[in-house]
Amino acid sequence: MNESSVTVIQMMFKIPDWVKKYHNSFRVFTDIPPRMFDEVNERLKKNTTDYPVVSIVIPTWNEEANIFNCVSSLSATESSIPFEIIVVNNNSTDNTQQTLDKLNIITLFQPTQGCGPTRQLGQEHARGKYILLADADVIYPPHWLDEMVSVLQQEETVCVYGRYSFIPVDGYPRWKLAIHETLKDIIAEFRHIKRPYLNAYGMSMGYIRELGMKVGFVDHNIRGEDGRLCFDLMPFGKIRQVKASAARVWTTPRTLQNEGGLSRVLLNRLKKEGKRFSSLFSPLAPHDTKTSKN
């Protein structure tokens, strides 16, 4: 059994040690010890630059504790590629801005509600040739940037997306989440054939900034702004998957909890994917993604 197989089996039952390092149990801004801000800022000072090749853009809304964990993980990025971190506060009503003010990153404020307008503002202020999209409630591995950019730099590539796993919580054991992830990744293989934009999630996605600026994000509050951008990028080149385990990001199963539990989510998604399975083998006709409905 090779090392990668062992790693996959281990991930079926527990999360990697590096994830535990950044998955702190903070609930509010005041839970975060000042020394931890100092540690993160020291890493940011060492690893980020004013002359980036890559801009990591993160929208945030009421994530005063999660955004710290996210930026903390990104501050430990191991890469020779110069990068910057841009966090856009989208009308947060909690102490998110207080958290951001204590981090040595670029922060912006977007008064128009929605991930589309928020990511758009971020890419407008980005200075890198490439943009990596990240989410505030996600933990990023140290080689995420390198793995994503190495595929993004391949010939004719205009957009890439990575894979993700869930951190277990009460009622959502790791082995059950792993089964869900395996089914998700299998479905993604079929989606990728003609409709890769269905796999492009803003928690782990990258593209060429010049082209992103050309097509732009949807300018109102609607789900799927990430997939819409990916769809609009398809005429310019190839969309590629980043399958390396070193690029797999980790998040809590908050979306699964909001949808009524793991069993219900699995059943609903299997039904949904079954109904549209045959359509996955033909491309979706060109249309206006800025006005179409979900």
Image: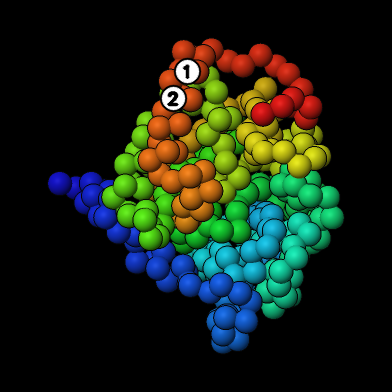
Q: Quadrant of residue 88?
A: bottom right
Q: Quadrant of residue 63?
A: bottom right
Q: Nearer the viewer, residue 130 or 40?
A: 40
Left or right of residue 100: residue 280: left
Q: Position of residue 168 (x, y in %)?
A: 38, 58
Q: Is residue 67 visible?
A: yes
* Amino acid type shown at disc 1: Lys
The answer to whether mark 2 and mark 1 are in CB contact below 8 A is: yes
Front residue of 128/277: it is 277
Gap in Å between the C-alphas at discs 2 and 1? 6 Å
Name the residue tied to disc 2. 271
**Which residue is painted at 48% across and 72% down in the image?**
24
Colour mapping used in the image: rainbow
In this view, 18 is above or below 176 = below
- Residue 188 is situated, as x and y percent measured from the top left of the image, at 45, 31
Question: Which is more toward the observer, 8 or 293?
Answer: 293
Q: Quadrant of residue 230?
A: top right
Q: Point out residue 39 in the picture as x, y percentages from the top left corner.
A: 55, 81
Query: Dot 1, how many residues are within 10 Å of its Cα: few (below 14), some (14-19), or many (20+)?
Result: few
- Please give the residue where the numbered disc 1 appears in the rendered image: 275
Q: Return the residue found at the far left.
A: 1
Kindly identify the residue that appears in the image at 59 percent across and 70 percent down: 65
Query: Residue sitting at 67 percent across and 66 percent down?
Result: 49
Q: Residues within 10 Å of mark 2 (few under 14, many from 20)?
A: few
Residue 287 appears left or right of 14: right
The x, y position of residue 50, in whole percent, is: 73, 65
Query: Circle 2 sits in a helix, a strand or a loop, which is it?
Result: helix
